[in-house]
Image: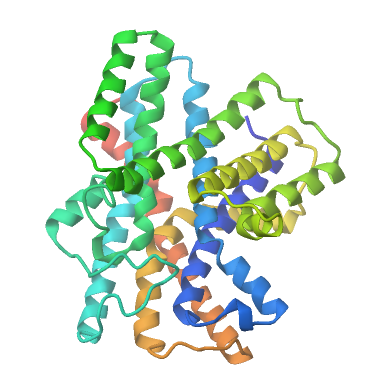
Amino acid sequence: MLRREENYSLDLLRGLSAVLVCLGHLWWAMFPLLSPAKAGLPARLLMLAMSQGHHAVLAFFVLSGYFVGGSILRSPVFRWRPYLLKRLVRLWAVLIPALAFAGVVGLAVVRLHPDVPADAFKIQGSWPGPYDFSLLTLACNLAFLQKIVSPVFANDGPLWSLSYEFWYYLLFPALLLAWRSGRLVLWAFVVALAAAGAASLSLDQIKESVEPFVAWFLVWMMGCGVYALERRRPQALKLGPWPTLALTAVLLACAMAPDQLLAAAHLWLPTKVQELGVGLAFAGVVYLRVANPALALPEALGRAGAFLSKFSYSLYLTHFPLVILIAFQCYPAAPREISLATLAAFLAWAALLLLNGWVFWWAFESRTDWVRGQVSRALGWNQ
């Protein structure tokens, strides 16, 4: 079981990851025309920090594998019913109101700006296309099929990762149970099904859908690997405080700036290989933390991490519709330069997005355990 200091550290990683996703989308909505080549060193460093959104999602995958996959690994007997109840209520408790919120904000954008084309700008590549408010798309998003068989509902772009996350929740225990049971027939069926599905797709479809699903599942599995290694060899990488901090800093640099590091070394790697490297770096950070529990965070930093982590899921699901509204309503002509005035506006909007995420946590996510209890009693299930 994690001790308090380890919880604080991983909470900080999770909370900061959500904040980086949020700030990155807001930044590219406000400063889409800003060129790193024409910016000074402070501005380039700030732009690098604001471009960490996708890497932060990979950190989410590693942490999810560690916590969710770890809970499966430590269970002597795995039961699908309580597992699915816990996971589904956890996801839907925020997803359902977040979809309603995205629909309302999206309709406001369409009503206020009917003549603006949906692809008028892109927010860090996350603009998914024309608004889709159909009931079919809503149903697919509730079933975690967005970006698999349907677009995201009401242009809430970050919902893409939730579908992957959900199917990883199902895939990992299924594979683990097949492995533990040793049922070769089941393995043969899974392989045959996967082969049949791949055969029905074109190479472009495989590259677009299957390749990222597999690559990010491997990243998710790295978190499971950290948990398994921690249980089997808890002292394998036990270091003193300063070596731990130094190695953590190196791994974070590798995770945050793989393009820059590869360019400096005159190397090139495919995007998905880079993402696997980023995932491995984050897995190393997590393992260093749990293998060296004596390293304590300053109390204020630990509490800040716990606070941000508490509403990170709500923040992740609800910030993007507001970012689109802010961009269309307030910045039809995006600022081309960073100034004290634009930075102050950026910080003010960021505070609003964080407040909105916290309100969603208070109204919905904080009541997840209560909702799960009510659903369990209504269904007559023992948790």
Q: Quadrant of residue 264?
A: bottom right
Residue 165 seen from this side: no
User: In this view, which residue lies farthest toward the front?
Assistant: 266
Left-right relation of 321 to 240: left
Image coords of residue 266 (percent x, y)? 67, 56
Image coords of residue 61 (percent x, y)? 49, 44
User: In this view, which residue lies farthest toward the left?
Assistant: 135
Instruction: Residue at 44% x, 64% y: name it.
Output: 357
Count of all numbered marks drawn on residues in the image:
0
Image coords of residue 55 (percent x, y)? 54, 54
Q: Quadrant of the C terminus?
A: top left
Q: Quadrant of residue 1?
A: top right
For residue 339, above or below residue 84: below
Q: Quadrant of residue 155?
A: bottom left
Q: Closest to the observer: 79 or 230?
A: 230
Q: Closest to the observer: 359 or 36?
A: 36
Instruction: Residue at 33% x, 32% y: name it.
Output: 84
Residue 261 seen from this side: yes
Left-right relation of 163 to 246: left
Left-right relation of 36 to 142: right
Instruction: Residue at 21% x, 53% y: name it.
Output: 150
Image coords of residue 195 (percent x, y)? 27, 27
